[in-house]
Amino acid sequence: MEKIAIKARTHTCGELRAEHDGLTVTLTGWVDSRRDHGSLIFVVLRDVYGISQVVFDPSEDKQVYESARELKNEYVIKLTGKVRRRPEGMVNPNMATGEIEVVAQDVKILNRADVPPFPIVDDVDASEELRFRYRYLDLRRPELQKNIVLRHRAAQTVRRYLDGQGFFEIETPFLMRSTPEGARDYLVPSRIHKGKFYALPQSPQTYKQILMIAGYDRYFQIVKCFRDEDLRAERQPEFTQIDMEMSFVEEEDIFRIAEGLMRTLFDEVIGMSLQTPFPIISFDEAMQRFGTDKPDVRFGMEISDVSEFVRSSEFKVFSSTVAGGGIVAGINLKGGAGYSRKQVDGLNQFVIDLGGKGVLTAKVKEDSWDSSIRKFLTDAMISGINEKLAAEAGDLLILIAGEKMQTLTNLGKLRNKLARDENLISKEEFKPLWVTEFPLLEFDEEEQRYVAMHHPFTSPREEDLALFDSSPGKVKARAYDLVLNGYEIAGGSIRNHRLDIQMKVFNLLKIDDKEAREKFGFLLDGLRFGAPPHGGIAFGFDRLLMLLAGENSIRNVIAFPKTTSALSLMDNAPAEVSEKQLKELGLKIIASL
């Protein structure tokens, strides 16, 4: 399809090449820089497509040359000129348009600009707060423009791929019923039905299951979701998901669709090939080997349980921990024996700050260990630990004793910290994997009840149904997460399509029949009318884009993000509203006590 041109310009600033030599063109954009060499004035003109160098030469047109003296950074201009090849030795290989320049024949200032509060350049030395306050200027920076363009291309790639796989793009409501289960809802008061509230969706979960019951077989949408929760670098109060649901599928079907999407995205958006199928490990294996259900497998330093070697040691911290049902586990920092006392103390404090009791270390020598606990262990114990941790002379072994899950989690966080500190992670490498067989439930000590690890509509494994009454904590879910470089980028499950099993799950969650009917009656009714087996997955689109763009925060791939305190500094949201608006909604603000 031919692109329809606009009258204001003949070309964009990133479009001109050597083959345009001699062509008269009209460009529009922002003044990126101006250099006055006395006899010539050079202006770099910028738009979202790139930059072009413009030459103002008094021998070509004295009046136009004089007009260029008025130009300042961020002025919006329109200019006409002739494209010519740059002189020999003046080609700029760092610019896509570096082979040419435009000799100005006419220039018109469309709008003047005040001096911006920070330079419109990459790697700008300005606080995030200042950049967010002037986000419209921040978004002019080439770095962010590249990210937003990448976001656009990724979204189009997703739509083309899923359309090709027979998916229907169907929109679901933003105003829905509040069904608190997980993060807090954002509530929207109703003007017509005073005292009642809509909620903004945390996900379209119930709606997409309804669509399966309605027979639409394969659904997707790129959708906004909302969660009122504490924020961090990869979390926002409003975020975007690639949401998918399919009927008559098993886990393997969903894996193949999701892997195909990932492979297509990486190929078409950043030109990188991903090998499929992705590796699959269980939740238990992920915790045992990496101390997290979001393992980064771009580096080694895996966790090993060495409890079997120290259960009878004279070192009471080890032997009493194992006797009490805990574990002793460790990691091996290869070549880390040169760590100073101060560095080791820093690792110890890191674990204490996580809520642990600290670490014990051993510097591996040719014949033994340099460690405060050496005298409490036999040669056989040391040999066994060395073999389990693949230790060699010059390595640093780091051991932690304690309750199993806390010990593994603390070692996992320490493993990631050491990898960052020691630059063990290749930023050019992408290693996805599936984590499966999650527990269906986890016990909330504060509420003294089981809660859903994923959400209450996740199906248990068929073979675990017998454990519902005797050992609910051992029931495994048909749930799966797609993990990439230490980030969960997608998660999903096979759903409960049978009403009896869904009600059993609700009962385990202490959701009685009345509460279930009140919160989810429409879905429960739907399950009674021939619900097909179904399952799905949702990609965190912002998080995936962050990785594709090589950024370390999702705020750099979102056009208008919030701060970590959920503020929009550009338009000062949230803001107070008038008494009239509150009265219309039947609301009154009560000062906090």
Image (cartoon, rainbow, N blue to C red):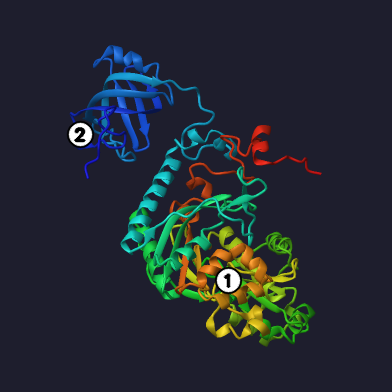
Residue located 65% across and 41% down the image? 585
How many residues crowd around disc 1 within 10 Å: few (fewer than 14), some, or many (20 or more)?
A: many
Residue located 41% across and 62% down the image? 219
Q: Looking at the picture, does residue 377 appear above or below residue 330?
A: below
Residue 364 appears in the rendering: no
Residue 225 appears in the rendering: yes
SS type, badge 1? helix
Q: Choose between 305 and 5: the one closer to the eye.
A: 5
Q: How many marks?
A: 2
Callout 2 amino acid? His
Quickly name the residue at label 1: 290
Q: Choose between 446 and 74: the one closer to the eye.
A: 446
Residue located 28% across and 29% down the image? 9
Callout 1 amino acid? Phe
Expressed as whole percent of the image width and height from the top left, the position of residue 138 reads 49, 36
Q: Can you tell which quarter of the image residue 302 is in?
A: bottom right
Q: Can you tell which quarter of the image residue 39 is in?
A: top left
Expressed as whole percent of the image width and height from the top left, the position of residue 441 reads 63, 73
Residue 537 marker: none
Q: Residue furthest right?
A: 593
Expressed as whole percent of the image width and height from the top left, the position of residue 162 reads 36, 60
Expressed as whole percent of the image width and height from the top left, the position of residue 562 reads 57, 44
Locate the C terminus by quadrant: top right
Quickly name the residue at label 2: 20
Q: Is residue 236 toward the left or the right of residue 347 in the image?
A: left
